[in-house]
Image: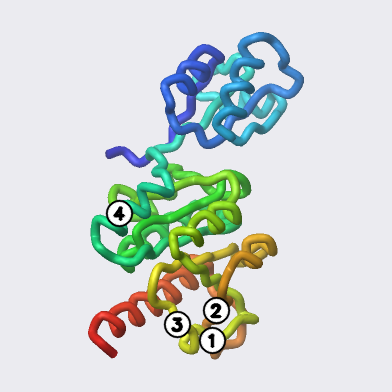
């Protein structure tokens, strides 16, 4: 499978892509364009909660690969997104309590790819990302995941906090990473769990953090105060793995 995000240019091509159900990450529209086809594209985008950015003609010209963008360029995902229900079904199929990684404000595609790779190796049943202010499934993400995207479902949701509320009804509880939290070794991280990771700069957003049942900190012994987001995800994911194995073996 080729790992690349592809662009769709031209009004009819973009309308057809929406109607065919292609997963479109982002839409760039000429600022001020108001004609019929553009209005149709905006309607289709809103129906699917697609991110819309209004940009100048110069920007579209610069990004266009065909030179025939007609005022609109769509970025389509290299991979199909899963549904949250697919992730829960994957856990049921393995007869395991769900283990889901949720990402808040991860905008770096290399971090996202590395986290998907770690999630796969740690036995997580899937990854959930928000639609806004977050990297989508681009070429760089696919490459960095080293093939994990073929096996680990990634769902994209409009509201991470609302999704967490729905997952709580399925029995999940949530732990987020923050240096002000309880040391991870002191927490019980067994059972159905969602691991929430934020960006290095901003961490987990306030509204998402308020939905978390626990805040876990990773012991830091060095001179700087934070780990890269993908490394933090790996450390916490493997503490969950360790506790699950300990639990299974009757410790």
Is the N terminus in the top left, top right, bottom left or bottom right quadrant?
top left
Residue drawn at point x = 72 percent, y = 14 percent: 34
Give the foreground label among 3 and 2: 3
Q: Among all residues in the image, which is located at the extreme right? A: 32
Q: For mark 2, what is the residue? A: 216
Give the foreground label among 1 and 3: 3
Disc number for residue 103:
none
Left or right: where does residue 21 sit relative to residue 208?
Answer: left
Q: CA distance from mark 1 to mark 4?
A: 30 Å
Left or right: where does residue 18 sit relative to residue 104?
Answer: left
Which of the two labelled residues, at mark 1 and mark 4, occupies the earlier sequence position?
Answer: 4
Pointer 1: residues within 10 angstroms few (<14), some, or many (20+)? some
The image position of residue 9, as x and y in percent, is: 52, 20
Disc number for residue 188:
3
Q: Secondary structure at mark 1?
A: strand
Is the C terminus in the top left, top right, bottom left or bottom right quadrant?
bottom left
Q: Is residue 142 visible?
A: no
Pointer 2: residues within 10 angstroms few (<14), some, or many (20+)? many
Disc number for residue 90:
4
Height in image: 46 above or below 133?
Answer: above
Q: For mark 1, what is the residue? A: 183
Which of the two labelled residues, at mark 1 and mark 3, occupies the earlier sequence position?
Answer: 1
Q: CA distance from mark 2 to mark 1?
A: 6 Å
Residue drawn at point x = 66 percent, y = 29 percent: 59
Q: Are marks 2 and 1 in contact (CB under 8 Å)?
A: yes
Q: CA distance from mark 3 to mark 2?
A: 10 Å
Height in image: 77 above or below 171?
Answer: above
Q: CA distance from mark 1 to mark 3?
A: 11 Å
Give the foreground label among 4 and 2: 4
């Amino acid at each position: 499978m080729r790992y690349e995000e592809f662009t769709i240019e031209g009004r009819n091509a973009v309308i057809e892509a929406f109607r065919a159900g292609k997963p479109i990450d982002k839409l760039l529209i000429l600022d001020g364009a108001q004609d019929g086809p553009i209005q149709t594209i905006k309607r289709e985008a809103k129906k699917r909660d697609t991110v819309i950015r209004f940009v100048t003609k110069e920007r579209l010209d610069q990004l266009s690969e065909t030179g025939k963008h007609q005022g609109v360029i769509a970025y389509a995902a290299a991979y199909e997104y899963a549904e949250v229900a697919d992730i829960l079904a994957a856990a049921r199929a393995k007869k395991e309590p769900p283990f889901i990684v949720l990402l808040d404000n991860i905008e770096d595609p290399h971090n996202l790819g590395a986290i998907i790779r770690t999630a796969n190796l740690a036995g997580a049943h899937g990854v959930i990302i928000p639609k806004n202010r977050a990297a989508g499934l681009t070429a760089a993400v696919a490459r960095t995941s080293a093939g994990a995207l073929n096996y680990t479902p990634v769902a994209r949701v409009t509201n991470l906090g609302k999704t967490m509320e729905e997952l709580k009804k399925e029995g999940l509880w949530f732990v987020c990473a923050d240096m002000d939290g309880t040391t991870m070794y002191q927490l019980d991280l067994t059972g159905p769990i969602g691991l929430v990771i934020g960006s290095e700069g901003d961490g987990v957003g306030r509204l998402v953090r308020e939905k978390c049942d626990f805040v876990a900190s990773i012991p830091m012994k060095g001179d700087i105060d934070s780990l890269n987001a993908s490394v933090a995800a790996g450390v916490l994911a493997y503490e969950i793995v360790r506790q699950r194995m300990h639990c299974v073996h009757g410790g």
